[in-house]
């Protein structure tokens, strides 16, 4: 019993070390470094956008509280934040697409 336990523990440790080593080697490869830099760029862009939106929200709140004239730049930023994927083009399903659009769901619900 004891030998089987130690064998399983050694095999498990060897597999774990092999997987960790492979991941470490992949992370320092050119593709791994490129992926990490791209992720860093995405994170920085998201942080910048969050800070800009937070600043715009606070400025809007202060302007309302102090009864100042609204700033059109702040309103545009807040509108863009409220509807980031807003697309004014009509929804046209692809050929063979069986999913319903929102309008079709509304019509189906009223039957």
Image (cartoon, helix red, strand yellow):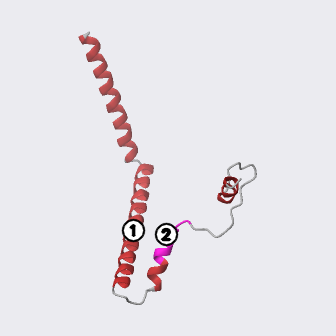
Q: What residue appears at the point 34 percent right and 37 percent down from the top-left corner?
A: 21
User: Residue 92, image x and y in percent?
Assistant: 71, 60
Q: Secondary structure beneath disc 2?
A: helix
In the rendered image, the vertical position of residue 26 relative to residue 110, given as above or below: above
> Local crowd at mark 1 within 10 Å, few (<14), some, or many (≥20)?
few
Residue highlighted by disc 1: 50
Nearer to us of marks 1 and 2 is: 2
The residue drawn where x is 67% and y is 50% is 99
Q: Please give the residue where the numbered disc 2 appears in the rendered image.
A: 82
| 78 relative to 86 in the view: left or right | left
* Residue 47 shown left or right of residue 82 in the figure: left
Q: Residue at 64%, 70% (x, y): give it.
A: 88
* Residue 93 lies within the magenta run: no
Residue 27 sits above or below residue 15 on the image: below
- In the figure, residue 22 lies in which quadrant? top left
Mark 1 residue element: helix
Q: Residue furthest left?
A: 2
Which residues, given as a range, are shown in magenta?
77-85
29 or 95, nearer to the observer: 95
Q: CA distance from mark 1 to mark 2?
A: 13 Å
């Amino acid at each position: 019993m004891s030998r089987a336990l130690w064998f399983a523990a050694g095999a498990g440790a060897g597999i774990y070390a092999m997987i960790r080593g492979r991941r470490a080697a992949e992370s320092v490869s050119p593709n791994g470094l490129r992926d990490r830099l791209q992720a860093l760029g995405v994170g920085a862009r998201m942080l910048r956008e969050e800070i800009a939106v937070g600043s715009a929200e606070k400025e809007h709140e202060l302007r309302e509280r102090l009864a100042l004239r609204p700033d059109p730049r702040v309103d545009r930023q807040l509108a863009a934040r409220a509807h980031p994927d807003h697309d004014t083009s009509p929804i046209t399903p692809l050929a063979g697409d069986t999913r319903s659009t929102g309008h079709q769901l509304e019509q189906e619900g009223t039957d």
